[in-house]
Amino acid sequence: MSQPLNILVTGGAGFIGSALVRHLVQNTSHNVLNVDALTYAGNLESLASVAESDRYDFVQANICDTAKITEILRSFKPDVVTHLAAESHVDRSIDGPAAFIETNLVGTFSMLSATLNYWRSLDGASKESFRFHHISTDEVFGALGEDGFFTEETAYDPRSPYSASKAGSDHLVRAWHHTYGLPVLITNCSNNYGPFHFPEKLIPLMIIKCLAGENLPVYGAGDNVRDWLYVDDHVRALQAVFEKGKVGDSYMIGGRSERTNIAVVEAICDTLDRLSPKADGRSYRNQITFVSDRPGHDFRYAIDATKLENELGWKPKHSFEDGIGATVQWYLDNRTWWEDIMSGAYQGDRLGLQKTG
Ligand code: NAD
């Protein structure tokens, strides 16, 4: 698939979706249509660098609106649908699971229904080469102990409303392949970080709280382990999968970069001590405080990405250390982007920003 493709990206105004859109417009010849409802997590300012490109377009639509999605598919005629639109924040799923069931489950069902009809209307080579690529998380596999890794064979064992809704969406996508023959691909990725990350998530939240001189709330003893991947490495993996992946298969994506939460927060503090030292010479580490643990907090996630590396030749380009350095520098250089969100200047009130940690 080296010729220009029409790629429909759902959730393209979110953190990973916007990184995918920027990557595709800036580094490939593909045409991109971003379909996003612009919930609290969607921000078109993250796409300012590609907004003027004649290979990029945006339609505001809810993925649960099957009629609208059907119309969009008919007019854009995608070769690939990359489905990222989702409610994505675990803490919010604990406080209000309904939106997660609606968007992640019902919305994925809606995307599958509309896409199946569209795919059935294709013929010849375009029907053969069409792909529906569902973007999912490693959280669907539950928690690991001290050892072991998630692989493509790991059994599903979701524990939070978020991960359960994503697990259900993965099952729907696989069912549409086995039952109706829809040519699907699924990727399950570890925790992402990088520029344009909404400031309710651990890494941007800690950077911003450091700069505001606030406490840095760390759940429990901070010993939960996540496998961190720089977002640009994720989107290169997505491109490799939808261009070269085997229909019906799933692929694990991870950075082989396991860190405890406290190690992540300390790395942010140390990076800021270097890049933006405090006038009084004290370390940002002095702001760290421990708060009671999240209910059902999975202990450890870690990905074995051997299949993706061996079959599709993908490897992460960024170590955790250089990725964190680049991310902290980006938040220092792009205060307007996150200050507008924190103040509610972008798209009205942004609820719940201070409540998570
Ligand atoms: P995000 O919350 O930053 O962005 C989600 C986007 O989806 C937003 O632009 C939002 O407006 C849009 N959206 C939400 N509901 C919608 C609806 N009903 N209709 C249309 N658009 C809607 O999420 P993210 O972190 O970029 O994650 C993107 C995808 O990747 C999700 O499916 C998530 O489960 C998956 N994922 C995320 C991570 C991570 O670390 N962030 C890791 C693995 C997988």
Image (cartoon, helix red, strand yellow):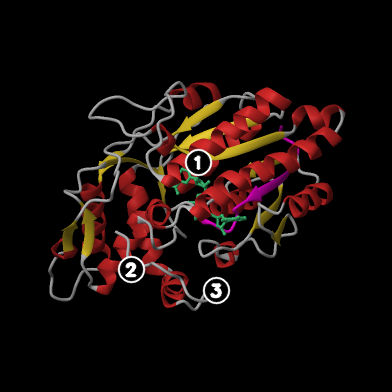
In the image, taking residue 136 as reference, residue 73 lies left or right, namely right
Which quadrant does the C terminus fall into? bottom left
- Residue 215 in percent (x, y) is at 20, 67
Q: Quadrant of residue 146?
A: top left
Query: Which residue sits at x=59%, y=63%?
Result: 38
Query: Could one spot residue 251 in this view of the protein?
Result: yes
342 or 53: nearer the viewer:
342
Question: Which element is circle 2 on?
Answer: loop
In the figure, 24 relative to 141: above or below?
below
Q: Which residue is mark 2?
A: 354
Q: Which residue is mark 3?
A: 347
- Residue 261 in percent (x, y) is at 25, 48
Q: Please tell me which of labels 1 and 3 falls first in the chain.
A: 1
Query: Could one spot residue 4 in this view of the protein?
Result: no
Q: Quadrant of residue 254?
A: top left
Question: Which element is circle 3 on?
Answer: loop
Q: Amino acid at mark 1?
A: Lys
